[in-house]
């Protein structure tokens, strides 16, 4: 488990820039990511400028309704018994997460393994070596993930996560310039994928409920479980 949570190490030698340095939580997006709209036409990714969106083109992706309600229920049925044995923690070892409990899982039922197989097929190259255990992060309604960059010692070029139980907003902010940012709307049962430059040169965070806005509109945050796959560093 210590190996798992080390993934959240904030490793930059410079202080990680925060949206609070000049970005309001309720700011409307300046530019829409047109290639990142759901099948319903709903906006899923937007950013501070067209330049920022172009910089991460093909590296930031949200797929709405990636899993069905039945598949979400199957994942929850498998995860809830173990999670209920744990208490929510409000002090993370490097202060990156607030109000969470987590676990990792190697063995899954056939249905859940098929879901994860789809995630891996969409998110990772065929020859990519994957981190064996799947990371499960359970955020309390009052919980949130602070701006951080995953450690390159433990994570490869890609991270892919399923969002269960709640919509949420993920914010990416350039570690070099806090005025360069993107917001990702992560609907319940969606899949998000971060790759390469977006992984290593932007902090990412899950906004707390009172700050959870997307393009100026409130996105209520409830308890949220993310099921996260990563590849190994090369």
Image: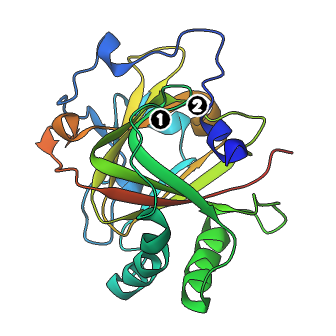
Front in this rendered view, residue 116 or 41: 116
Pointer 1 or 2: first along the chain: 2
Residue 90, image x, y percentages: 38, 35
Residue at left 53%, top 45%?
Answer: 57
Q: Residue furthest bottom?
A: 110
Position of residue 7 in the picture relative to residue 165 (left or right): right
Residue at left 34%, top 57%?
Answer: 224
Front in this rendered view, residue 106 or 207: 106
Position of residue 64 in the picture relative to residue 130 (left or right): left
Q: CA distance from mark 1 to mark 2?
A: 7 Å
Quarter of the rendering containing residue 70: bottom left
Label 2 Cα crowd, 10 Å radius (few <14 / some 14-19 / many 20+): many
The quadrant the C terminus occupies is top right
Residue at left 42%, top 16%?
Answer: 178
Residue 16, image x, y percentages: 51, 16
Give the number of the disc on residue 204: 1
Front in this rendered view, residue 162 or 140: 140
Position of residue 69 in the picture relative to residue 8 (left or right): left
Residue 187, image x, y percentages: 30, 61
Residue wearing tag 2: 149
Residue at left 55%, top 82%?
Answer: 112
Residue 68 seen from this side: yes
* Vertical relation: 230 (above or below) 5: below
Q: Residue furthest left?
A: 217
Q: Secondary structure at mark 1?
A: strand
Q: State yes or no: discs 1 and 2 in contact (Cβ < 8 Å).
A: yes
* Vertical relation: 53 (above or below) 74: above
Give the number of the disc on residue 10: none
Residue 139, image x, y percentages: 37, 50
Label 1 Cα crowd, 10 Å radius (few <14 / some 14-19 / many 20+): many
Quarter of the rendering containing residue 134: bottom right
């Amino acid at each position: 488990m210590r190996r798992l949570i080390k993934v959240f190490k904030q490793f930059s030698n410079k202080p990680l820039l925060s949206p609070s340095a000049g970005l309001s939580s309720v700011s409307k997006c300046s530019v829409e990511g047109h290639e990142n709209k759901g099948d319903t036409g709903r906006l899923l990714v937007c950013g501070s400028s067209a330049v920022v969106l172009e910089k991460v083109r093909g590296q930031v992706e949200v797929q709405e309704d990636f899993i069905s309600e039945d598949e979400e229920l199957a994942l929850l049925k498998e995860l809830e018994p173990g999670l209920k044995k744990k208490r929510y923690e409000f002090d993370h070892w490097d202060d990156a997460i607030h109000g969470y409990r987590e676990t990792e899982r190697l063995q899954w039922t056939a249905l859940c393994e098929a879901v994860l197989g789809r995630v891996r097929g969409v998110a990772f190259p065929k020859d990519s070596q994957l981190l064996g255990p799947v990371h499960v992060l359970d955020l309390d309604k009052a919980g949130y993930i602070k701006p951080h960059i995953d450690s390159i010692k433990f994570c490869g070029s890609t991270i892919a996560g399923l969002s269960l139980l709640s919509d949420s907003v993920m914010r990416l902010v350039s570690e070099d310039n806090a005025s360069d940012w993107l917001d990702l709307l992560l609907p319940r049962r969606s899949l998000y994928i971060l790759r390469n430059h977006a992984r290593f040169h932007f902090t990412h965070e899950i906004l707390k409920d009172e700050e959870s806005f997307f393009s100026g509109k409130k996105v209520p945050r409830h308890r949220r479980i993310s099921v996260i796959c990563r590849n190994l560093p090369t």
